[in-house]
Amino acid sequence: MKGIVLFVTVVLLAYGIHYFWVLLPIVSGYGAKHICSSVFIADFSEKHRREDVDTFPMKYATFNINYTDLSVSSSMLGFAPTKAIYRNGLGATLINELTEEEVRNQKFNVEIMSDINQDKIPWPMGDQMNDEVFPSHINKIQLEDAINDLFIEKDPANLIRTRAVVVLYDGRLISEKYASGFSKKSKFLGWSMTKSIINALIGILVKDKKLNIDESAPVPEWNNSNDPRHSITIRHLLQQQSGLDFKEDYYAKSDVTEMLFLRSDMGAFAASHPLKSKPGTQCYYSSGSTNILSRLIRHTVGENEYHSFPYRRLFSKLGMNSFVMEVDPSGTFVGSSYSWGTARDWARFGLLYLNNGYYNNEQILTEEWIKQSVTLGGVTQYGQHGLHFWLNTGANNDSHTRKFPNAPADMFCASGFNGQNIFIIPSKKLVIVRFGLTRTPEEEYGANQFLKNVISSINL
């Protein structure tokens, strides 16, 4: 009996050591990349940088910030050394597979957003607010109470750490609030809200007639008509129905963590995966699909245009002058996860969709594209996915199956890790943005009740 116990103990110990040994480079890489972005893009305080990585086992990582070469080096108890570098217009990039010299020597036509004072430009292209009377049919006190409540920590064991909230009504910014240390100038990481940025970029190319989302996705690895992946369309990728055998698990070494923290060409890595199911028959959330799309955009617009494309065709047209999309070591935007902007700029992005693609006297996205983006995909029976947006339709329009039952069925949202959200509610003329650092189960910060409280402040 003692021998069996000893054997089991040794096996479990060996498994544990192997598990953490495999995980160390991923944890170290996450820390180096995030701290690099936090320092050189967002200019976070040391307090907030540490708060972002204060989880096990990352809290035991060591970070060295080099302000001379704009880099951050990280290791875990002296093991798994990693390095991320910052480049203006390209953000922070984790060095993987390619050497640092190879990455630094890359030459791209980068678009640097003009440094204009938006305080003197009227909203929404700028930050100057009109001196209009507050809408009489909105209960201002009730609205502010709803927002303030999101900044109150009710459970010390499960902090929600709301950092920013912005509320737009009928295109007008009617309320906003920031946690201590943050302001309207602070840049926030959208995490998977970046996926919805990819939706817009694909939509622009569809409007330009450069892409047809119902044709086979022009991915080099799938060009052969005999390849079963040749039947994957851009729509399949946007609806999370590609059928690729890609595992999305952030708490182990999986396809998604290997892609984000160990690979140089994330889109190529994701595209290399075989099929697990027939395209269009199963829905499975995959960041790999988004990075395939980001690489596809690169191939479509070409090298001379790619790195300026989001800025020229989207961000500058919306007044999103703070925005930064980050690239992988190969130079492709990490469309699944890495973009930074102020809460107001993320709200501007939401306003584009509230206005059916029309913004500042220009039809940037077609109304048909917006309609398709917020239409439930064929096999998403639980009422979740449109085209890289989350929906609130519920199965068979049943409110009991909605993720946010207190919000209308026409609400759709962009959603990111740790509780980042843009809620767009056309029937209520609302765009609601929330940023925070929420690590409670399912990143629940009370969003459903918060939405109810905001909506009920509007008396129509």
Image: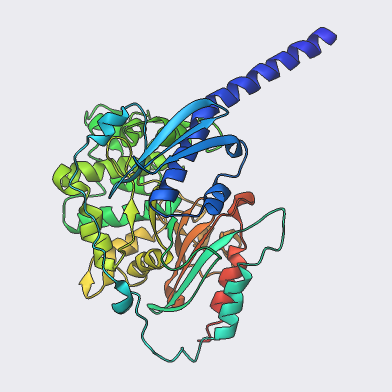
Residue 352 horizontal/vertical position (percent): 32, 68
Q: Nearer the viewer, residue 69 or 322?
A: 69
Left or right of 263? Residue 247 is right
| Residue 266 x %, y % | 35, 35
Q: Is residue 174 visible?
A: yes
Labels in figure, total: 0
Is residue 75 shown left or right of residue 356?
right
The scheme the figure's colours follow is: rainbow
Residue in view at x 35 percent, y 64 percent = 349
Residue 280 shown left or right of residue 393 in the figure: left
| Quadrant of the drawing holding the N terminus | top right
The quadrant in which residue 252 appears is: top right
Q: Quadrant of residue 102?
A: top left
Q: Residue at x 59, y 84 (%)?
A: 141
The residue at the far top in this view is 3
Can you give x and y, in whole percent of width and height, for residue 429 in the image?
A: 42, 77
**Is 232 above or below relative to 362?**
above
